[in-house]
Image (spheres, helix red, strand yellow):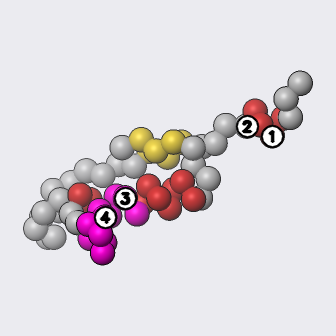
Amino acid sequence: MKNSIENIQKPILVILAAGMASRYGSAKQVESFGPFGEKIIDYSIYDAIRAGFGKVVL
């Protein structure tokens, strides 16, 4: 029998990244931002996985 901790599912994060970003001037969710061209959404997904989320849905 498996340990009960193994049967616990990790939470799923749903990211709602909508909007025109009219004040910013472009879609900032997919704008290159990091030193290697990472996008802001990449940082959000990375942080979510490190925080324990098992799946990220955009």
Q: Amino acid at mark 2?
A: Ile
Q: Measure how far apart labels 4 and 1 are at the Cα level.
A: 34 Å
Front position among marks 2 and 4: 4
Q: Which residue is mark 4?
A: 38
The vertical placement of 30 against 35, above or below, is above
Q: Which of pointers 4 and 1 lies earlier in the amino acid sequence?
A: 1
The vertical placement of 5 against 50, above or below, is above
In the displayed structure, does residue 14 sit left or right of residue 58? Answer: right
Residue at the location (42% across, 60% down)?
44
Q: Amino acid at mark 4?
A: Glu
Q: Which residue is mark 2?
A: 8
- Count residues near mark 3 (Cα–Cα under 10 Å), then give few for <14, some for 14-19, many for 20+: some
Q: Measure how far apart labels 2 and 3 are at the Cα level.
A: 26 Å
Q: Position of residue 56 (x, y in %)?
A: 46, 44
Q: Measure how far apart labels 1 and 2 are at the Cα level.
A: 5 Å
Q: Which residues are magenta?
A: 33-43
Q: Which residue is mark 1?
A: 5
Q: Measure how far apart labels 1 and 3 are at the Cα level.
A: 29 Å
The answer to which image quadrant residue 43 occupies is: bottom left
The answer to which image quadrant residue 14 occupies is: top left
Q: Are marks 1 and 2 in contact (CB under 8 Å)?
A: yes
Q: Residue furthest bottom?
A: 35
Q: Are marks 4 and 3 in contact (CB under 8 Å)?
A: yes
Q: Residue furthest right?
A: 1
How many numbered discs sit on the rendered protein? Answer: 4
Q: Amino acid at mark 3?
A: Asp
